[in-house]
Amino acid sequence: MKNDSILNLKQKVENFPESTGVYIFYDHSGKVIYVGKAKNLRKRVLSYFSDSSPKSAYILKKAQNIEFYITDTETEALILESVLIKKHRPIMNIQLRDDKQYPLLKLTLYEEYPRLILARRFEDDGAKYYGPYTQSGTVRETISMVKKLFNLRSCNWNLPKSKPKRPCLNYFIENCKAPCQGYITKEDYQEIVREVIGFMEGRYEEIINKLYNEMQKYSKNLEFEKAAKVRDKIRLLQNLSEKQKILTFNRENKDLIQFYVEDHKAKVLVYLIREGKLVEKRIFNLTLPEEYSRDELLESFILQYYSVRDIPEIIVLPFLVFGGEVDLKEFLCRRKGTKVEIRTPESEDEEKLLNMALKDLTIESLKSEKVWLALSELKRIFNLPNLPVAIEGYDISNLQGREAVGARVYFQNGYPDKNRYRRYKIKYTEESPNDYLMLQEVIKRRLNKIEEDPLPDIMLIDGGKGQLNAVLEVFEELKIKPKFILALAKEREEIFVPGNSDSILLPYDSPALHLLQQVRDEAHRFAVSYHRKLRSKKLIDSHLEKIPGIGEKRMKILLEAFNDLESLKKASLEDLKKIPGISEKIAEKIYLYFHKSS
């Protein structure tokens, strides 16, 4: 039945035109499941029927109908695709979500006398939007500053249709020009709006120069009070300009875009650089389908983001997007009306900023999780400079000094990263076991690889004050400064830190303590499991060495097949014969050896 449906769809597509446009897949209920764009509609949609990717298979499995729209240009196809994705929110498209958690600034350009107000989502209403901002306080401060600097109105009157009988308090304290009373012409008010746009886009120098000329004019006319007020505005703008991070000296206007994907969720960060300064950062959430590519993610974001926002002269990406159905650069150039350059980082500043963006996104992704409380608490309790997103845990395991091992576990963003776990077979050979010397050996071997494996934010040692001091001696000997080290003792869950003779006791319901316990216990588990493995290997080796025909190669094969001696003893003759590399004759010798000895 489904094959008939796919065949019917294919026959329909055979009649599609070889034109640029947009195609839409619908399910059995008429719901849109995917929207795509194409230079050649017929060729592109037919490719779904020969494509074996999971994405194509899923779309064809769900699809009951397909329609298309022809567009005159590729740019029109891009815009139409963006509009349809926003309207229908198809399950198989990457979608830029309207995120209510971050506020926006909205300049109401559709009004005759625009205002700058707080908004919670983007709308296609002709307004100019700025943000989203990570803190609502920033939005309110900016609105207040714009009132003081430019006297933009903030009232809700529907000017000029309805208006108050007299000007409000803002007029008398010189925070508004009272357009409601006709005290300023529409043309002059629009000039103020243009200045506000310049301010919001970070073009401070341009505004400062204009204000400076205004101040000079008041001074010449001996209007010193007015000149002083303009001077105060200039100082405020200069202070704002100085607070911004200077990245380049060529006064470029560009956006840097970075993204982070975890657990099938994506966050995108845009750094806005205006006149060579970092003026703003914006964070967005993306809804991802089951199947997607990095190119598709970045292309979808750029298309949806810049379809409603201003486009700078330069857009810097972590990698170039290739293979799209239509030219993204052409779309941006046509929409802006001038040349737009899309490229990867070309300077050390740009590289650093993209790396900083990735770190920002990592931290933002944590804020919605419980682990954020633990990491934040650790930062506060121990007065750390940054959120401790990287934590290493160390433990030693041995049986009266025999088969001694060390283990390192690594937690990234509060979760185990098993790819960065390390095991250490202790080389220390003294007769009497010494846990301190064993620990020092492990830490010394770890620090010898500091160039390729940088230090974590927190290094956690399973133990007490003695273990902590032993580790600190190694750092001092190698002249390496640790970021932060602590020891966590099991008995009373005491925490020991350098320079503090007393232990720290955290409440038993502390998220920070729970995370430290998790790291400590994982390090202990990993060390013990390695120790047991070595003991089992030694036991197996001691027995296998006595069997004729068993050399190193066959020992290795048997160790991989059996985790411990008991498993090897219990193996049947048939089980032994099935092991690749073990002949029937050798299998019989092994079986007879263990069963005779038992």
Image (tube, helix red, strand yellow):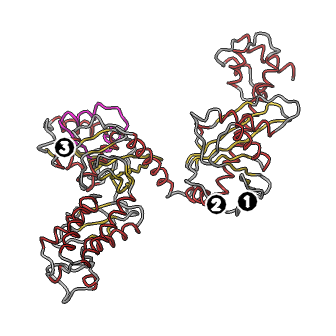
Mark 3 near mark 2, Cβ–Cβ under 8 Å?
A: no
Mark 2 near mark 1, Cβ–Cβ under 8 Å?
A: yes
The label on residue 504 is: 1
Residue type at the position of mark 3: Lys
Circle 1 packing at 10 Å, graded few (<14), some (14-19), many (20+), is few
Sooner in the amino-acid sequence: mark 3 or mark 2: 3
Residue type at the position of mark 2: Ile
Residue type at the position of mark 1: Ile
The label on residue 381 is: 2
Q: What is the C-alpha distance between the residues marked 3 and 2?
A: 51 Å
For the C terminus, the quadrant is top right
Residue at position x 72%, y 54% from top?
499
Judge left or right: residue 412 versus residue 138.
right
Q: Secondary structure at mark 3?
A: loop
Q: Is residue 14 magenta?
A: no
Judge left or right: residue 239 versus residue 311.
right
Q: Which residue is mark 3?
A: 339
Q: Please tell me in which quadrant of the rendered image residue 438 appears.
A: top right
